[in-house]
Image (cartoon, rainbow, N blue to C red):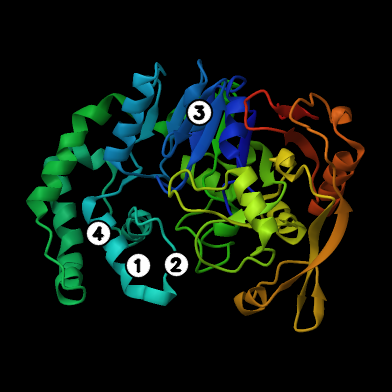
Amino acid sequence: MPALVLLGAQWGDEGKGKATDLLGGSVDYVVRYQGGNNAGHTVVVGDQKYALHLLPSGILSPGCTPVIGNGVVVDPSVLLSELSGLNERGVDTSKLLISGNAHIITPYNVTVDKVTERFLGKRKIGTTGRGIGPTYADKINRVGIRVQDLYDESILTQKVEAALDAKNQMLTKLYNRRAIAVEQVVGELLGYADKLAPYVADTVLVLNEALEQDKVVLFEGGQGTLLDIDHGTYPFVTSSNPTAGGACTGAGVGPTKISRVIGILKAYTTRVGAGPFPTELFDEDGEALRRIGGERGVTTGRDRRCGWFDAVIARYATRVNGLTDFFLTKLDVLTGWEQIPVCVAYEIDGRRVEELPYSQTDFHHAKPVYEMLPGWSEDISKAKSFSDLPKNAQAYVKALEEMSGAPISAIGVGPGRDETIEINSFL
């Protein structure tokens, strides 16, 4: 049962799409198990660049079946638009499967997300405004709309009525917005039913049968470990579990079926949205990382906050995910620095702390303790093996591996599909 989980080991945007795509030719199924269209992956194939939001990266690999699991929240209009865009570019999307238990992002979820975030003012979380959080809240409050509900108009109407009873009170009395009509929402959602029908399936059954048949299944997380609702920098987190445990609940497979957990690490650190970020840079080095690394959100279009590599976060990701391997991305971006700082610990109220503090207050006040590593100036984008890298780049990778607590099995030296050094096979 070769089941692998691939996830972000920082705050997201680590390059998971490239890693998934590289494995896509060797796996039978690629499964998104959480998140929604607030997560974006960029995949470069030859001279073609693809920006994916809801779709698993495996959709670009012929022979691979992409799956949207029950733990994902789905905006039908975004999904259909994304499918249409790929079809126009000659990508076959016919093998996509969508869990009938996945929850739908409704128009009122998007409205609630935007008005509540605006209402928070300076205390805002930094959401994408795409209705992700309110949809997960509806799911937990048991007033959510699932994909399967699109095929029973009576049940759909009842559920929309139940959800809007409270939401319209809030929108009109608290936020001074117009009430949303039940009929309008139901009509819009029913309009997606026929278009989605060819893809809807019992994905839990499909995936478990595939594993029993020794098919290779790759579970792909959105966002990153530090944005996990339980294990991230709460409250500046997403509304689901991108960590490895989320793959089991978000896809319907047991933990005993997971054979490998791969964490994606950027050779430096970035973050989108509000929240603490100990190694964040506000100087020309930060600007250089942003410019050279092309650090702009695929989904949001927002500039990413940039900082040096944080080994404390990497160790934490190894622990909470049970990581067996790392895929280190964007090593090429660091070319040109004489010395590269790496955060090895934090200073908090005069104390040296080498593990991530559980207290939000402590983490907010954490100051990075840096170790300086020698840089390199040689172009590494053509490197095909670890020995092709400059000695200082090799030393940097080995230092990060030792500090992070799991072997680095692959290294990204450029954005292209073929610009990767594979040290140990993931399969």
Q: Which residue is mark 1?
A: 117
- Amino acid found under the numbered disc labelled 3: Lys
Marks 4 and 1 in Cβ contact (< 8 Å): no
The residue sitting at 26% across, 49% down in the picture is 145
Spot occupied by residue 335 in the image (x, y as percentages of width and height): 77, 42
- Amino acid found under the numbered disc labelled 2: Ile
Relative horizontal placement of residue 312, taking residue 58 as reference (left or right)? right
Instruction: Compute the Cα span from label 3 to label 4.
Output: 31 Å
Task: Determine the secondary structure under disc 2.
Answer: loop
Q: Earlier in the sequence, mark 1 or mark 3?
A: 3
Q: Residues within 10 Å of mark 1 (few under 14, many from 20)?
A: some
Instruction: Compute the Cα span from label 4 to label 1.
Output: 10 Å
Instruction: Compute the Cα span from label 1 to label 2.
Output: 7 Å
Q: Is residue 155 above or below residue 369?
A: above
Spot occupied by residue 79 in the image (x, y as percentages of width and height): 33, 36
Marks 4 and 2 in Cβ contact (< 8 Å): no
Q: Which residue is mark 2?
A: 125
Q: Earlier in the sequence, mark 4 or mark 2?
A: 4
Q: Which residue is mark 3?
A: 49
Spot occupied by residue 143 in the image (x, y as percentages of width and height): 26, 57
Spot occupied by residue 366 in the image (x, y as percentages of width and height): 70, 74
Q: Residues within 10 Å of mark 3 (few under 14, many from 20)?
A: few
Q: Which quadrant of the figure contains the N terminus?
A: top right
Marks 1 and 3 in Cβ contact (< 8 Å): no
Q: Which residue is mark 4?
A: 111
Relative horizontal placement of residue 36, taking residue 200 as reference (left or right)? right
